[in-house]
Image (cartoon, rainbow, N blue to C red):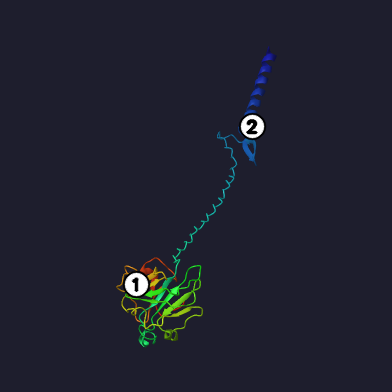
Amino acid sequence: MKKITLFLAFFVFFATAFWIRTTKSFFNDTEKITGNVLSVATNWVSGTPTPTTQPTPISTPTPQLTLTPSPTPISTPELTPTPTPTSVPIANRLVINEVYYDVCGGADCGGNKGDEGKNEWIEIYNPTSNSVNISGWKICDNTSCEIIPSSPAIPVGGFAIVTPQATTWDYWLIPAGVIKITLGTSNIGNGLHNDDDRVILKDNLGNIVDQMSYGNDKTAFDPACPDVAEGHSLEREPAGKDTDTAADFVDRYPPTPGS
């Protein structure tokens, strides 16, 4: 019995000693971190655990999207349509194309061009596709007519100048090819008035082929062509233009006989 009691006493002693040693070692461990590895704690005496330091994460920058700029649209220029030129109506018959009725007698109107009546002239234009012979036709004013003597035919696109006397050719430079017709009278009709009158071209049957009027005479046009100054003429522009109005004629200075 004594032995058993003694054995128990020694057992308790050694067990107590072992427990004390083991416990002291446990509470004296302090936590250690080497790099990212957690070591065994070696110091717990204070009773407050040393927090484990977590490594600070390195944030990876989010790549930014580079926006590709949209191309600037190139505007297509609008095409401006080319206006279609308006065609000028041209007569399909002979026309009185230019009239020189107020003859210049001095330097104040461009130089001496002859005498009133004798050196007045009328230009006739042929816009047709055939030559036309006007021998036997008539040139008339507001009171009377003069018969056109025998003369060459007016060619296609050509001109003829009708005047009372041949001295008219001395005052003007007439282009080659123009038909020159001299009436052989003292004037055209009773002489073309300087302020208002009419000029009428009739064929050999007496039909009116063309006519024009100026000033206060409204026989051909109403309103009539405006009266022009001494030394000027009234001329169709362009040659052969025919709308049967006074707008066919313009004030021409200097006059252009035969062109």
Residue 237 in view here: no
Q: Quadrant of residue 248?
A: bottom left
SS for dot 1 = strand
Badge 2 marks a residue whose secondary structure is helix
Q: Nearer the viewer, mark 2 or mark 1?
A: 1
Write down the residue under mark 2.
25
Circle number at residue 213: 1
Question: In this orientation, does residue 211 appear?
Answer: yes
Is residue 109 placed above or below 237 in the rendered structure?
below
Task: Return the residue nearer the eye: 4 or 146.
Answer: 146
Between residue 106 and residue 102, name the one nearer to us: 102
Residue at left offset 64%, top offset 26%: 19
Outermost residue on the right side: it is 3
Q: Amino acid at mark 1?
A: Ser
- In the rendered image, the residue lying farthest to the left is 216
Frontmost residue, 46 versus 116: 116
Place of residue 212 in the rendered image (x, y in percent of width and height, measured from the top left): 36, 71
For the N terminus, the quadrant is top right
Q: Residue 181 in the image: state x and y as whole percent.
A: 45, 79
Residue at image point 46% right, 80% down: 180
Q: In this rendering, is residue 211 above or below 55? A: below
| Badge 2 density bin: few <14, some 14–19, many ≥20, Cα 10 Å | some
Q: Amino acid at mark 2?
A: Ser
